[in-house]
Structure formats: structure tokens, C-alpha cells
């Protein structure tokens, strides 16, 4: 190699590695996908190495590409630091941020929030990954994600986004047809709606098994939105955070001061992506909104005593 790679070519390399497709990288860089392909071809020719394996599914880093990643990230960090200093931290927020969120949280809370937020950021776009599993940040599926399990290895920025409670709910029609629920012991005689047990995205979703008996599951779904519809249709009780429950009265709380589980959502981003102004802007938005809306995550009323439900993480 007679000359060093240009920083702009390495920037194209980083965005393609993160997006996994030419179209995804071109959106982030605001150029044509052919420009991305041409820059990558030039970089590979200059380095004398193949950096990506091409397939119909997209671009995947080769061993040489993986080796180049940390060096390109160091250059990116230096460029961002210089931009911060020279601009007095007044950096324009623009580009695409890919955000991975749990399904119900994404639909009920984050989508309405983003619709208002983006009106004030005309040059910013969001790819919202709403799915019944958590985004894989290790393979750069998302720039940042909300998840139940904070990573214990890898170079990530991690913060507790919010602690929340899952309460029991049922439809008025279901409660009218079945035996009264006056205490926790009565629950063993009732039907439940739950997650498909061999498709759990996290062990933190195993809250029904912690109630002290084997629940009678009448319907299991991979997502909580479907569970809420099933419970509203009268198929059984479900456990859910307050933000999942519609305000139309189709679901009402059951023993909410006696039976509930506590969990935490964690906000996570790879360290190198967290340094990007557009990613930090979305990060700060989520933190500030969660802090300002406690009623979405914990029902009001007298302070109840939680059941001794075991958790995988303290605090």
C-alpha cells in the first residue's frame, strides 16, 4: 500500500459495516448506493484486502474487515472530537438512527414520542425496529437499543432507562364469568394469557412462573400487544406494564396492590456509536421522557408490597 486510506472512504466502510446493506449505508450517508459501492471497492483495492462478503442478504465483514473496524472507529472518534471542539459543541443533528425497542414499548410509547420529536429535527430520520425480540447490537443491527438484559461484555454505554412494574389485568367480561379473585391464592383457578415459553426474548419475561403455581395458559403469543388483545377478548388474565393497557376500559387491574413484578429497561449503545451526535440526541430524548412520565411505568396509589419475585439483576 503506497498511500494511506482517505478518512471519507473509512467513513463509508463504517456505515456499511453498521447498516449491512448498500441501501442502509446510503441513507445514513445521504448518497446514492452506487457511491457507497464505489468507495468500498476503492478502499479494498487500496488495502489489497476484501473487507466484506457480498450476498443477497447484504454485506458482512470478513476477518480483515473486522480487524479494520477498531482502527476506523478510533479515526471516527478523533474526527468527532475535533468537530466538537471547533464548533463549540453546536453540531447539526442529521442522518439516520436505527433504534431497537420491545414491541409494546415501541408501539405505545416510543412511536408517539418520535412523531413529535422529529418535527423539531427535520434532518434526522429514525429506523424503529419494533419486534418481539431485542436488537442485536453486537452485529450492529441497531445503533442503540432498549432491552431487559444489560450486556456484561463488550464496549457499550449502558444506563438504566426506567424501572417498571407488571400488574395483573383482565377484561370485565372475563371477571364476570369466573370466580371472584379476592386474594393471590384465587389466581390458581383462573386462565392466563402469556408469552410462548420456548420463544422468550429474555428470562426476565418469565414473571408468571414466579407467582407460586403453574399458571393455566390458554393462549400464548410472542408479543405483548397480541396478549393484550387476547386478554381484552376475555381469554384470561395477563401481566403487563401500565403503558400497554388501553384506556377504553377493556382491561382492568386485578390485585394491583398485592401482585406485581418489577423489571428494568436498559438503554444500550456501542461506545463508538454513542459518540455520534444523532445517536446521543435520541439517547437523551428517551432518558428525559422516561424520567418525566412515571405514570406510564408504575400505577399510582398507596405504596404496595411487592411479591418476592426473583430477578436476574439487582438495583
Image (cartoon, grey):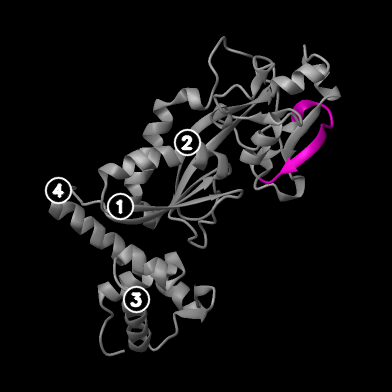
Q: Which residue is mark 4?
A: 88
Q: Is residue 289 left or right of residue 119?
A: right
Assign a secondary structure to mark 3. helix
- Separation of residues labelled 2 and 1 (CA atoms): 19 Å
Q: Which mark is residue 124?
A: 1
Residue 11 image position (x, y, % from top left)? 31, 69
Q: In this picture, is 100 found above or below 19?
A: above
Residue 137 image position (x, y, % from top left)? 50, 56
Residue 214 image position (x, y, % from top left)? 84, 32
Q: In this picture, is 228 found above or below 53?
A: above
Q: Are discs 4 and 2 less than 8 Å apart at CB?
A: no
Assign a secondary structure to mark 4. loop
Residue 220 counted in the magenta span: yes
Labels 2 and 1: the sequence-earlier one: 2
- Separation of residues labelled 4 and 3 (CA atoms): 30 Å
Assign a secondary structure to mark 2. helix
Q: Is residue 112 left or right of residue 173?
A: left
| Depth check, front residue: 46 or 183 | 183
Region in magenta: 210-222
Answer few, some or many: residues within 10 Å of disc 1's Cα (few below 14, many 20 plus, some between 14 and 19). some
Labels 1 and 3: the sequence-earlier one: 3
Q: In this picture, is 216 found above or below 271?
A: above
Q: Which mark is residue 36?
A: 3
Q: Is residue 154 left or right of residue 7?
A: right
- Separation of residues labelled 1 and 3 (CA atoms): 20 Å
Labels 4 and 2: the sequence-earlier one: 4
Q: Which residue is mark 2?
A: 109
Amino acid at each position: 500500500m503506497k498511500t494511506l486510506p482517505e478518512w471519507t472512504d473509512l467513513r463509508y466502510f463504517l456505515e456499511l459495516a453498521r447498516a449491512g446493506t448498500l441501501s442502509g449505508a446510503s441513507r445514513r450517508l445521504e448518497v446514492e448506493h452506487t457511491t457507497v459501492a464505489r468507495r468500498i471497492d476503492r478502499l479494498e483495492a487500496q488495502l489489497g484486502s476484501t473487507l466484506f462478503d457480498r450476498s443477497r442478504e447484504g454485506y458482512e465483514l470478513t476477518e480483515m474487515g473486522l480487524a479494520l473496524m477498531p482502527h476506523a472507529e478510533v479515526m471516527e472518534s478523533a474526527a468527532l472530537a475535533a468537530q466538537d471542539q471547533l464548533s463549540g459543541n453546536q453540531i447539526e443533528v442529521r442522518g439516520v438512527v436505527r433504534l431497537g425497542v420491545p414491541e409494546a414499548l415501541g408501539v405505545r410509547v416510543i412511536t408517539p414520542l418520535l412523531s413529535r420529536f422529529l418535527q423539531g429535527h427535520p434532518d434526522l430520520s429514525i429506523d424503529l425496529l419494533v419486534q418481539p425480540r431485542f436488537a442485536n447490537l453486537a452485529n450492529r443491527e441497531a445503533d442503540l437499543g432498549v432491552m431487559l438484559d444489560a450486556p456484561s461484555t463488550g464496549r457499550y454505554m449502558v444506563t438504566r432507562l426506567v424501572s417498571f412494574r407488571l400488574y395483573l389485568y383482565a377484561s370485565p367480561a372475563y371477571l364476570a364469568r369466573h370466580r371472584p379473585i379476592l386474594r393471590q391464592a384465587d389466581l390458581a383457578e383462573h386462565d392466563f394469557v402469556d408469552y410462548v415459553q420456548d420463544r422468550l426474548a429474555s428470562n426476565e419475561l418469565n414473571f408468571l412462573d414466579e407467582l407460586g403455581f403453574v399458571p393455566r395458559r390458554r393462549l400464548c403469543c410472542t408479543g405483548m400487544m397480541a396478549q393484550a388483545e387476547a386478554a381484552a377478548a376475555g381469554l384470561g388474565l395477563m401481566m403487563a406494564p401500565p403503558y400497554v393497557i388501553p384506556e377504553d376500559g377493556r382491561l382492568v387491574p386485578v390485585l394491583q396492590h398485592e401482585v406485581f413484578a418489577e423489571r428494568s429497561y436498559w438503554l444500550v449503545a456501542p461506545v463508538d456509536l454513542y459518540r455520534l451526535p444523532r445517536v446521543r440526541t435520541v439517547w437523551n430524548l428517551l432518558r428525559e421522557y422516561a424520567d418525566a412520565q412515571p405514570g406510564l411505568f408504575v400505577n399510582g396509589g398507596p405504596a404496595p408490597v411487592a411479591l418476592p419475585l426473583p430477578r436476574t439483576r439487582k438495583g
